[in-house]
Image (cartoon, grey):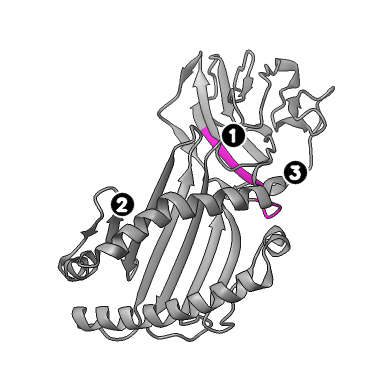
Amino acid sequence: MVLLVPLIIVLTGKLSDARSHSLRYFRLGVSDPGHGIPEFISVGYVDSHPITTYDSVSRRKEPRAPWMAENLAPDHWERYTQLLRGWQQTFKKELQHLESLYNHSGFHTYQRMIGCELLEDGSTTGFLQYAYDGQDFIIFDKDTLSWTALDNIAYITKKAWEANRHKLQYEKNWLEEECIAWLKRFLEYGKDTLQRTEPPLVRVNRRETFPGMTTLFCRAHGFYPPEISMIWMKNGEEIVQQVDYGDILPSGDGTYQTWVSVELDAQSSELYSCHIEHCGLHTVLQVPQDYWSPRSYEVRRDSKKNSVELPSHHREKSLPKLR
């Protein structure tokens, strides 16, 4: 039996609710469309939220967030529909050109990612890169107005694209100015969704994994934004070995879930603690031994206070299954 005297859950919040945000556009072209895969797809995201889509079947740019539809006029969607129809043809020609250079046939893909980030300190970044068959192909450096080629075929593209100095400057300006302006506008449109904070609900349980060994699980769910830090500590020191981390996954309701576990000797009398940092938390909690059971312990969120508090008494909760 694990002797936790006591087990502690420590939840801390950042000093500021400021956080980074990103605007990204992904485009995909395929050489052999079919089986439900369009020839061309374009999807826009603010942070992890899809905001726009276009594909070669619908041939329309459409909103994927209600606040996008509410704030942008019909002529915006028509104008960008026409632009993306042009990109569809450009992608087809460029993919055919690459297949010729590589001497490839059959199914191949061509991808483009462009976007920018507004960081916590107010600084910005921008990025533009292409991939062929899922591998990085060529990457734009806006500071040097040059392209970095990842193979010999990409070097051919690099020489051709760097010959157009006007286009290089246009890409730099779009990344540094226009992209950031759109991101700020979208953050205002969708502020109730994009700039909200939902502190995590935390659940701790233990499981006998092998004779004489126990695994402690610290699970967080119901939080937004998805950035979160979770670590196990022993006697105040972070545990590095025998720790597993779960992916941060969407829960399907606009929030996220994740977990961290640690394996230990079942007879251990050390002091273990799960430390959680999230911008929605403003409380530090110590869970006394009385609140611990062999099965689970849950820290509940008080939505009105936007904080996390101890339950008045312990009982098992019915929660979504976390993996």
Q: Earlier in the sequence, mark 3 or mark 1?
A: 1
Q: Is residue 314 in the magenta section?
A: no
Q: Earlier in the sequence, mark 3 or mark 2?
A: 2
Q: Say if 95 sits above or below 243 in the image.
A: below
Q: Quadrant of the N terminus?
A: top right
Q: Residues within 10 Å of mark 1 (few under 14, many from 20)?
A: many
Residue 62 position within the rendered picture, expressed as x and y whole percent measured from the top left: 63, 72
Q: Is residue 8 left or right of residue 98?
A: right
The mark closer to the camera, 1 or 2, is 2
- Give the residue at mark 1: 217
Label number found at residue 142: 2
Q: Say if 172 sits above or below 37 in the image.
A: above
Q: Residues within 10 Å of mark 3 (few under 14, many from 20)?
A: few
- Give the residue at mark 3: 319
Distance from disc 3 to disc 2, alpha carbons, whole Å, reads 47 Å
Distance from disc 3 to disc 1, alpha carbons, whole Å, reads 15 Å
What kind of residue is marked 2?
Lys
